[in-house]
Amino acid sequence: MTTTLSVTAPTIDTRHLKSLQPLDIPARLLLGPGPSNADPTVLAAMNRQPIGHLDKAYLQLMDEVQSLMRYAWQTDNRMTLPVSGTGSAAMEATLANTVEPGDKVLVCVNGYFGHRLVDMAGRYGAEVSSIHRAWGEVFTLADIRAALEEHRPQIMAIVHAETSTGVCQPMDGIGDLCREYDCLLILDTVTSLGGVPLFLDQWGVDLAYSCSQKGLSCPPGISPFTMSDRALTKLNNRQSKVANWYLDMSLLSNYWGKGRTYHHTAPVNMTYAIREALRLLAEEGLENRWTRHQNAAERLYAGLEEMDLTCHVPREHRLHTLTTVRIPAGIDGKAVTNKLIDDHNLELGGGLGDLAGKVWRVGLMGYNATPENVDTFLAALKQVLTEVA
Amino acid sequence: MTTTLSVTAPTIDTRHLKSLQPLDIPARLLLGPGPSNADPTVLAAMNRQPIGHLDKAYLQLMDEVQSLMRYAWQTDNRMTLPVSGTGSAAMEATLANTVEPGDKVLVCVNGYFGHRLVDMAGRYGAEVSSIHRAWGEVFTLADIRAALEEHRPQIMAIVHAETSTGVCQPMDGIGDLCREYDCLLILDTVTSLGGVPLFLDQWGVDLAYSCSQKGLSCPPGISPFTMSDRALTKLNNRQSKVANWYLDMSLLSNYWGKGRTYHHTAPVNMTYAIREALRLLAEEGLENRWTRHQNAAERLYAGLEEMDLTCHVPREHRLHTLTTVRIPAGIDGKAVTNKLIDDHNLELGGGLGDLAGKVWRVGLMGYNATPENVDTFLAALKQVLTEVA
């Protein structure tokens, strides 16, 4: 059969045609929950012509990214690779690959991202149960043991660094409990990778995800993902296909592994960028990096205290990369963030969910975690507070 | 309860620590199936500091991108936006949002990407049927009517520009048939957007997707997606949540619409890049753009003919952006592509699937669709063919 379809040539419609100027973006100091500013060296690396995703020069880059991601996370996991999307895609990848319909998933919810994990797990057909703590609190081992005992899940998910609350979850003993109850442990490290101590293997974490635009100082668009051999075993024993083609690690492992089989076109320039971001992290060294973040956070705490402002989270559970500051009574929080961006080109975050209207969120992440930025922020905030008071 | 978990401080493991040089990427002329070279103006736009994904300057960019994407596709669809991933993610978004378990999906398969649509639709619980044509042929209206009559699907998917075969599917009458049989029409325009004539609304297309790294001359990592009000009605009437959180258009429409509700962090710099790519397309104008691609393709056909090389697809169904060339008997196709990249820094594609080892794939897309590039390619190929003969 060779019937040719006749093609008419319609007229081009120009109603949506806009004549625009070349891009002009305001220079912002990004001290909110993310994105943070990118390291200029990372931007320079990204600003190159793409090459093919099967070019041998690109395949070498992939190996380098995998290795440095293992260093950053302190893991030996073979399946450590960047997902071709922002952090939420890497989050979804952990559940999509491990959850089969009817699996029991337990989620520890003490902030916005715990709620999102519940929503996502349900979409993959999990029977989801959750335990809750107030926004700003952490879970204890006793909380977790009781929930594992009650629900006997196949998978438990918890957030290491809750971007919505500024809490850093202590991890000692949680991995042991998950092994005792034979369940996989998923850890959200979106706001901790590259900023605060992370020891995935020592903590017994099976799956973790992060993003590029916070502690790594790379633009958003590519996201670290890792899974242990225990998690891989669950993937390999699935009765059903992964219910998400784009994030299916059984297919992606052929591209990232020896086969180098085409799966989808990689975000080539974002890979340049994250490779450079990880290179800079390696050059600085994890210990120096973590100390730099701690120092910046402590300088911030001291400055806030001087201004009689209160941190929402008790000192021992504060996340160095992100601080929640209570909005003082009588102050319009939104007016402050608006003035900061309009008059100072400085982005500060507002509260989410249970903390909406109650806190500001101050991010000091990666390239931005410097004493100079802390001082700039404190001075700007002081000025704006007098103006809106 | 305020039990504090004690945290031990493990030693940092440096086995995965690599000391790397700053990025050094070879300069390639990308004349394969994609990515193609980015327009340098697009790279310059991308190479800026990120701003927040809720910054008013960013929200304005989003509106601009949506409007110019409507122009590029010739559609009025409100839900026209870029997906935060590469083209395969946008492909998956069309199915994820419209397919509910048990829905009948008909896929027209005449190449690699038709097969992928079958795989993806199955993962969302569709009852998938398919019709087939050899790799290099197109479907007739009679083929499609017979299949619609037999299968009575809720959704039909077809590929406009098959990147694996170099075929351009004539679209006249297909949308009318889909309306007659009351089914949604999904169109793959990955290798046609910005390169060959596309009139989504006139063709009665309900959902379409594309990529950034071909006809738009932007790096990969962000991908045009559009859905009609007919498709939105199916989404709004779903009994079940979209089985993919990251690509759920019912959530994303709140971020891209009036609410501006945070869903996921946008790939900010990729948005800068695609905004610039679409601006350049608008500046050139669709008609000039399409003519430029046609001229480059015809110059290529003439040059190949002079070298006694045969195109795989009959002239009337050739895709101007991508040409499949039959590998002559006695020539090792892989040796040719290897020599082209090693000696000429020129990327040419090999065959996929049924055409593996049988064809080369030559892409002349966006910024790369110039007579100079055609001549460079023909000269390099001529030289390499004498060397490997």
Image (cartoon, coloured by chain):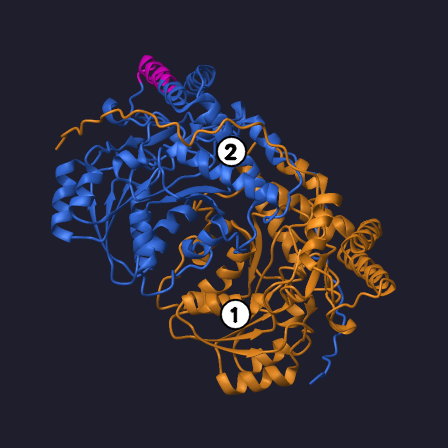
Chain colours: A orange, B blue
Whether residue A183 is situated above or below residue B139 in the rendered picture = below
Quarter of image, res B358: top left
Q: Give the magenta part as a residue range.
A: B295-308
Residue at image coords 19%, 44% = B179
Q: Is residue A81 visible?
A: yes
Q: Who is closer to the viewer here, B346 or B228?
A: B228
Question: Principal SS element in the magenta part?
Answer: helix
CA separation, marks 1 and 2?
39 Å
Q: Who is closer to the viewer here, B130 or A262?
A: B130
Residue at image coords 44%, 54% = B247
Q: What residue does disc 1 label?
A: A230
Instruction: Tell me the tag on residue B218.
Output: 2
Instruction: Tell me the tag on residue A113.
Output: none
| Chain under callout 2 | B
Whether residue B240 is situated above or below residue B276 in the rendered picture = below
| Chain under callout 1 | A
Q: Is residue A139 left or right of residue A151?
A: right
From the top left corner, tell me how far across and down residue A312 is, in percent: 73, 70
